[in-house]
Image (spheres, rainbow, N blue to C red):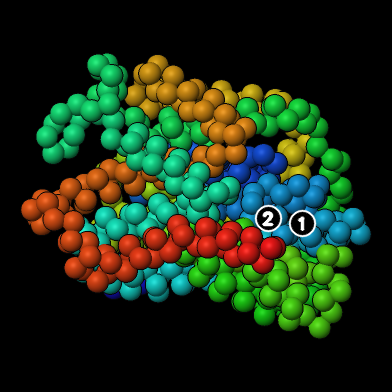
Amino acid sequence: MILDLFAQTLLDYLMTPHMWGLALVGVGIGIVLGALPGVSSTMALAILLPVSFGLEPAAAMLFLIAVFVSSVYGGSISAILINIPGTPGAIVTQFDGYPMAQQGKAGHALAYALISSTIGGLIGLALLVTLAPVVAQAAMSFRSPEFAMATVFGLVLLSFASGGSTFRGILVAAVGVLLGMVGFDLLTDTARFDFGTRTLQSGIELVPVTVGIFGLAEVLRNLAAGREGLPRVPHIGRLMPPFSAVAKLWKPILRGGVIGTFVGAIPAAGSAIAVALTYAQEKRLSRTPGNFGKGEPAGIAGPEAANSASVGGSLVPMMTLGIPGDPITAVLMGALLIHGLRPGPMLFANNPGFVAGIYVAVFLAVVLTLVIGFGFMRVVAQIMRVPRTLLFCTIALLCVVGAFAIRNSLTDVYVMLFFGVLGYVMFLLRLPPAPLVFGLILGPILEENLRRSLILSRGSWTVFIERPIALTLILMSLAAVLAPVAMALWRRRRAR
């Protein structure tokens, strides 16, 4: 059934000019923003999120997913040409991509990355289409206690993997949950945490927070670093390597695609872990491991396939359980919520056509990234020479315009500015900003299911222990919290 919907939706998109236009524009913008150092995929989505408000839900997701998929590849362009990864997932690509560029083979390195990224993206999509309905069907047996504990587990995992100490991540996530409680109570219709102001009675909007903490804060961080220029962009030369050289990379690409999908499907794992595992695996299996780090094509192909495949994997927990797998899918989940669609197993039951639209969006984004990537690679290299100060001042202006455009309210601009400064302060204090957004998104879901569970159980907390799945999620959450403590004690004991 889902394949029939996929084929029908793909045909509808191909016959609709404005859908094609959105996909083309999204891919073009994503490649450029991903290639610019300091502009991550999360930041690109955050500043472009307001653009999607005037679109239909399917068109909005097509545009945002096009930006998402193409920016993931775009990060490899700067990693190869100037040894500065544009996105976290491209960190490993620079190990062999930049040495190959120094050898006068920048075009070949970019082609290896683009071809591998395309195949890896298709592998991730195939596994997404296969795994997501199975996970969603299993989640159909979830009730309020299971959803509440799944949300807790997701928050703990996301806090654990957000950088810094787990305790700090959980603390920031708790603040995000509290921010999600600002405004009228859904059950009692009583105002909470509004400090007597009408402005806060409608709650804190997700978009100004996201734009501020992922967009403006990153601008402030880069401007404060004081890096004006970029290293010289080398000559690209011939793009397409010999077909025989590409054909030899099918094993690294296949392995990278599978690893990237399954690692990406783990909440909080992210593309950085997927590419690191793939690179280590390829170096271990290689007959010439000494060539890695000196311009080995397999060192580009495997990680880039994993990087792109992790996109499909990260959509699995977001679509099936309503838990964002990383900051990028948190922004996508926010877009769904704004358009009145709640991710989770009921999305598959109530909106199968929309789910098929997401699959088609990933497919079109992957294919168009291949076409536009080859066609405009030299143009992107020229854009990378733009002065960084001019670039980030333009992004800051987009942040202000995007925040104002949500409701034509200066209040949202003030909220965006506040969280932009807060995000920069959190960077100085080494506090991870992502858990705050996770808490803001998942907080209302946690509160709703927690209160509903307690109402049905007449106030008894044993409802979470009596149900096996909920109990398992509680134990896994405790293990994730206690694991760093146990490891620290073990290291201290060994040191003694």
Q: Name the residue under label 2.
A: 90
What residue is drawn where x is 63% and y is 56%? 89
Looking at the picture, which amino acid does disc 2 mark? Answer: Ala
Q: Residue 238, percent across and down?
A: 84, 59
Query: To which quarter of the image does residue 492 belong?
Result: bottom right
Residue 398 horizontal side relative to residue 247, left or right: left
Q: Is residue 385 above or below residue 476?
A: above
Q: Residue 471, percent across and down?
A: 28, 67
What is the quadrant of the N terminus in the image?
bottom left
Residue 374 horizontal side relative to residue 162, left or right: right
Taking the image as drawn, is residue 85 in sight? yes
Q: Which of 424 and 468 is in front in this view?
A: 468
What is the number of the mark on residue 94?
Answer: 1
Query: To which quarter of the image does residue 277 belong?
Result: bottom right
Label 1 secondary element: helix
Evaluate if marks 2 and 1 touch, with contact meaning CB atoms under 8 Å apart: yes
Q: In this view, does 413 lie above or below 323?
A: above
What residue is drawn where x is 26% and y is 58%? 147
Residue furthest toward the right? 103
